[in-house]
Structure formats: structure tokens, C-alpha cells
Image (tube, grey):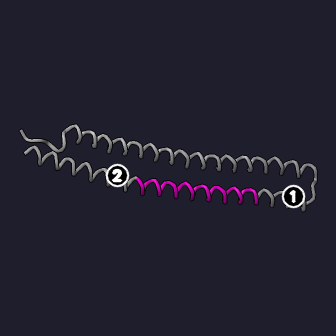
Amino acid sequence: MERRDVTWEDVNRKERELTEFEDKYRHEKKLFERNEKELYDRFREFGNLVDEEIEKMTYVLERFSVSSEDMQDYFFNMENLMLESQTVYNQQTIKLDEKQLECEKAFRKNRDKLEEEYYQMRKRYESSNK
């Protein structure tokens, strides 16, 4: 009886390892998508809060006859706040995108390695069972 280098169980184990690795990556990808959505939602919600605050303050400023200079200062400050918020949002989006690209690159590299190991293992199994 001939000795096998690789058993069918070894091949199946490697296939499961590859499948689990891909599942883990899909899970990580969903986390990135969830984080991007959460970041966007928080940015949008902040914008809505600022808009509401501007509406309320406009009413107050008009009602109490505040000087036009004070009104301009207020609106200038609110505009700066929104610009700062946009800048932070853009920076965080870039960071998330960079992390996601790094993750994809590492995934592809490791997946290629696992696939190669799997195919080599199958070849060895098939050649030893001829």
C-alpha cells in the first residue's frame, strides 16, 4: 500500500481555513461600511443641529434687534464651525479609506498565499492517489 503525503482531511482543513479567512474579511469589510455610514450620519446630524440653531438664533437676533455686526459675527462663527466639521469629516473619511485599502491589500496577499497552498495540496493529494 502506498503512503499518501496529503490526506483528504488535510485538503478539507486547508479549504476551511481559506473559507474562514474570506468570511473574516467580509466581516471586516462590513465593519468598515458600518463605520463609514456612522461617520456620515454623525456629520449629517451635526449639520442639521447647526441649521436648527441658526434658525432659532436668527429669530432671536431679529426679535431683539441685535446689531448687524453681531449678527455677522454669529453667522461667521457658525460658518467656521461647519467648515471645521467638514474638514474633520473629510480627514476621518480619508483615514477610514486608507485603513480599508490596507486591509484589502493584506487580504489579497494572504488569500493568494492560502489559495496557492490549497491548490498545491490538492495537486499532491491527486498525484498520490493515481
Magenta: main secondary structure equals: helix
Mark before the other along the chain sequence, 2 or 1: 1
Residue 14 quadrant: top left
Q: Position of residue 99 (x, y in %)?
A: 51, 55
Q: Is residue 82 magenta?
A: yes
The tag on residue 130 is none
Q: Position of residue 34 (x, y in %)?
A: 53, 44
1 vs 21, left or right, is left
87 vs 123, left or right, is right
Quarter that holds the N terminus: top left
Label 1 CA crowd tier, 10 Å (few <14, some 14–19, many 20+): some
122 vs 98, left or right, is left
Tally of numbered tags: 2
Q: Secondary structure at mark 1?
A: helix
Q: How many angstroms separate mark 2 from mark 1 (CA)?
A: 59 Å
Mark 1 belongs to which amino acid?
Met
The tag on residue 71 is 1
- The residues colored magenta run 80-106
Label 2 CA crowd tier, 10 Å (few <14, some 14–19, many 20+): some
Q: Secondary structure at mark 2?
A: helix
Residue shown at 21%/48% (left/top)?
Answer: 121
Residue shown at 59%/45% (left/top)?
Answer: 38
Q: Is residue 105 above or below residue 22?
A: below
94 vs 123, left or right, is right
Quarter that holds the C terminus: top left
Q: Are marks 2 and 1 in contact (CB under 8 Å)?
A: no
- The residue carrying mark 2 is 111
Q: Position of residue 124 (x, y in %)?
A: 16, 49
Residue shown at 66%/57% (left/top)?
Answer: 88
65 vs 98, nearest the viewer: 98
Label 2 vs label 1, nearer the camera: 2
Mark 2 belongs to which amino acid?
Arg
